[in-house]
Image (cartoon, rainbow, N blue to C red):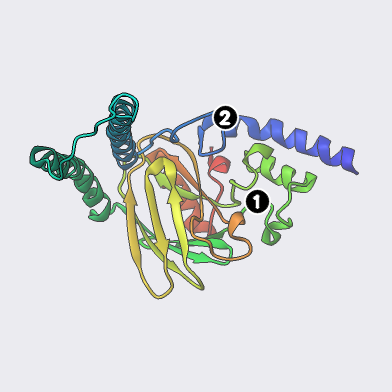
Amino acid sequence: MKLMNKLSAAFVAALAAPAAMAQELVGRPVDKALGFQPAATELARDLQWLDHMILVIITAITIFVCALLAIVIVRYNKRANPNPGKFTHNSPLEIAWTLGPILILVFIGAFSLPILFKQQEIPQGDITIKVTGYQWYWGYEYVDAEVAYDSYMIGAPATGGDNRLTAEVEEQLVAAGYTKDEFLLATDTAVVVPVGKVIVMQLTGADVIHSWTIPAFGVKQDAVPGRLSQLWFKAEKEGVFFGQCSELCGQAHAYMPITVKAVSEEAYAKWLEASKAEGGYVEVASLN
């Protein structure tokens, strides 16, 4: 039986490989990699640039403070300076260490606040999607279209698994165009969006607080029961992007991933029409 499952999985993998290879997978762990995921939106590029800029400032401050400590240790220890000076004030120094941090913070704020405002000021969306967080899956509703569906992790109990990577779950992953490396990341249905369009996500929670985030998009927003919050993004390239629920929401919090597929406008229009006709989600690869 196990042999048959392996052969079946291999056969499905061969069929699904062209579809999987057609789109870049972003957001899965990469061995020995450091830093951020490749930015796929303007928001993510801004955040990563700000992080790098602040890192330079912090590094310079750290080196400066360590250099001062080294000078004090060497020059003003008891052996080198047996008769220490006795004074209580140094006005120029006190002014410098007061104005210095103020100027640094003003400089950082001058760059960080516009980036924050860009995130928080929601533009007019080309597509609006309502997102509802449940224990433990996501529900998506395309507000301007008659398309709504739930999204479960492949391998979750709702999809015939038990949150473990078994041969059956690996077969499901392969059939969906993934590999076992995307276990805990891939979902049975994905958010499908067109590149170059402003997507507005309206978020809420059905039970407890969840958090919807896609690192490559530079977006993260809590989904709070009884409250409707928003985020926006505009994908700049096609691909499959992974995220996770980022607010501890209960026992199966670790099994609540997010998958977004950014496709061309033509592919999106075809997907939306097919999904409307079916009354729910249609796999994008099946339309090629």
Q: Residue at x 39, y 43 (%)?
A: 217
Residue 172 visible in the picture: yes
Amino acid of disc 1 = Ile
Relative depth, front residue between 61 and 82: 82
Amino acid of disc 2 = Met
For mark 1, what is the residue?
154
Q: Please identify, in this view, whether the residue under mark 2 or under mark 1 is nearer the observer.
A: 1
Give x and y (percent) for residue 85.
Answer: 19, 35
Relative depth, front residue between 134 and 104: 104
Residue 113 horizontal side relative to residue 232, left or right: left
Q: Which mark is residue 21?
A: 2
Q: Is residue 246 above or below residue 20?
A: below
Q: Residue at x 34, y 64 (%)?
A: 229
Residue 184 horizontal side relative to residue 64, left or right: right
Relative depth, front residue between 49 and 195: 49
Residue 152 visible in the picture: no
Residue 247 horizontal side relative to residue 236, left or right: right
Q: Residue at x 78, y 47 (%)?
A: 166
Query: Crowdedness of circle 1 by 10 Å Cα count: few (<14), some, many (20+)?
Result: many
Say what secondary structure mark 2 lies in: helix
N-terminal of the two: label 2 or label 1? Answer: 2
Give x and y (percent) for residue 163.
Answer: 70, 54
Discs 2, 1 touching: Cβ within 8 Å: no
- Quadrant of the rendered structure where residue 51 is? top left
Give x and y (percent) for residue 115.
Answer: 24, 45
- Quadrant of the rendered structure where residue 130 is? bottom left
